[in-house]
Amino acid sequence: MSTETQQLSDLARLLANAKNVVVLTGAGVSKESGIPTFRDSLEGYWSRFDPGELATPDAFAKDPETVTRWYDERRMAALACEPNPGHFALARIEAAISERGGRFTLLTQNVDRLHQRAGSQNVVEVHGSLVEWRCTETGERYTDLPAPFPSYPPRSPMNGALRPNVVWFGESLPKEALDAADDALGSCDLYLAIGTSGVVYPATGFVGAAKDAGARAAELNMNDTPVTHVFDFTPRGESGSLLPALYELAFGQGAA
Ligand code: BV8
C-alpha cells in the first residue's frame, strides 16, 4: 500500500471515531468548481492586479469602482459555478459524524458559499461572503442584489456605497466567527486543513489551537505549505478526489 493510501486509511480510521472534527477549507476546495484560487494568477483584465492588494480597505478607499467591479465579477462567477465532489463529500462526512453523535465544524476561508450549496450545515465563514454586501454609510447588509450590479461602486437604498461583506487584509475577522472557531477548536480531536496555502492568519494558526487541545491534524492539499510540518498526515492530491475517497474509507461500504 502506498504511503499516500496508507495515510488516507489511517486518517479515515481516526475520522470514523472522531468526537469533534474541525475542518478549515481554502480556495483549493473550490478550484474544481472552476473558481480560480486566491493566489492563482488572475486571468485576463485582472492579471495586472495582485489580489492581496485589491482585498484591502485602502484599495476600496482609493478606487471603489475597480474593487467593487472585481468582487462583482467574482460574485457572478461563484453564482454560476456548482459545488464539486469535494464539497459534497464534506457535507456527507458532516452528516455521518453528526449521526454518530459527534460534532463537526466547517471553518471556511472561502467566500463563494459553495459549501452551503453542497449541503454543509455548520459552516463558519471566517472571511465573510461574496453574496452579502453592506452599506458603508449604515452598515446595513444586503443579499437580494442585482446580478450583476448596474454600476460601480453599487449604491444602497440610502445611496451609500456598497462593499462586499468580506474580511479584507488588515481587518479583524468577525467576532462571532472567531468565537465559533475558538469554541470548536478548544475540544477538537481531529483537525483537517484542506486546499489552503497556509499563509493567511489567524486562520492558518487554527491548527495550533487544535494541537493544543490534543487533536491529530491532517493537511489535504496539492502541495506542501509553510505549515505542513505541523501536521500528522499530509495526503497530497485534489480535494475533489481525496475527500470522496476519505468518506468511503471512513463511512462507506468498505469502511474498516
Ligand atoms: C487580521 C477575503 C487582525 C477577501 C481574505 C499587516 C496588517 C494587518 C494584518 C497583517 C499584516 N501582515 C500580516 C497580517 C495578517 C494578515 C495576513 O495573514 N497576511 C498574510 C498574507 C501574511 N491577515 C489579516 O489581515 C487578517 N486580519 O489579521 O486582523 C489585524 C487587524 C488589523 C491590523 C493587524 C491585525 C484578515 C485575513 C483575511 C483576508 N481576506 N479573503 C477575498 O476573498 O477577496 S484572505 C484570502 O486568502 C482568501 O480568503 C483565501 O481563502 C485566503 C487564503 O488563501 P487560500 O484559501 O489558502 O488560497 P490560495 O490561493 O492561497 O491557496 C490555494 C491552495 O489550494 C494552494 O495551496 C493550492 O496548492 C491548493 N489547491 C489548488 N487546487 C487544489 C488545491 N488543493 C486541493 N485540491 C485542489 N483541486
Image (cartoon, rainbow, N blue to C red):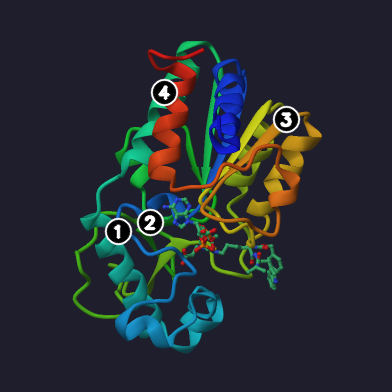
Residue 132 quadrant: bottom left
Residue at image location 30% in from the left, 82% down from the top: 44
Helix, strand or loop at mark 2? helix
Q: Earlier in the sequence, mark 3 or mark 1?
A: 1
Q: Measure the C-alpha gap from mark 1 to mark 4.
A: 25 Å
Q: Label 2 crowding class (10 Å Cα cut-off): few <14, some 14-19, many 20+?
A: some
Q: Earlier in the sequence, mark 3 or mark 4?
A: 3
The residue that mark 2 highlights is 31
The residue that mark 3 highlights is 215
Estimate the x, y position of residue 1 in percent, counting from the top left: 55, 29
Q: Measure the C-alpha gap from mark 4 to mark 2.
A: 22 Å
The residue that mark 1 highlights is 34
Helix, strand or loop at mark 4? helix
Estimate the x, y position of residue 110 in percent, counting from the top left: 45, 53
Amino acid residing under circle 4: Glu
Question: Contact, CB < 8 Å: mark 1 with mark 2?
Answer: yes
Q: Measure the C-alpha gap from mark 3 to mark 4.
A: 22 Å
Q: Disc number at residue 248?
A: 4
Mark 2 beta carbon near ligand 1 (under 8 Å): yes
Q: Earlier in the sequence, mark 1 or mark 4?
A: 1
Ligand 1 image-quadrant field = bottom right
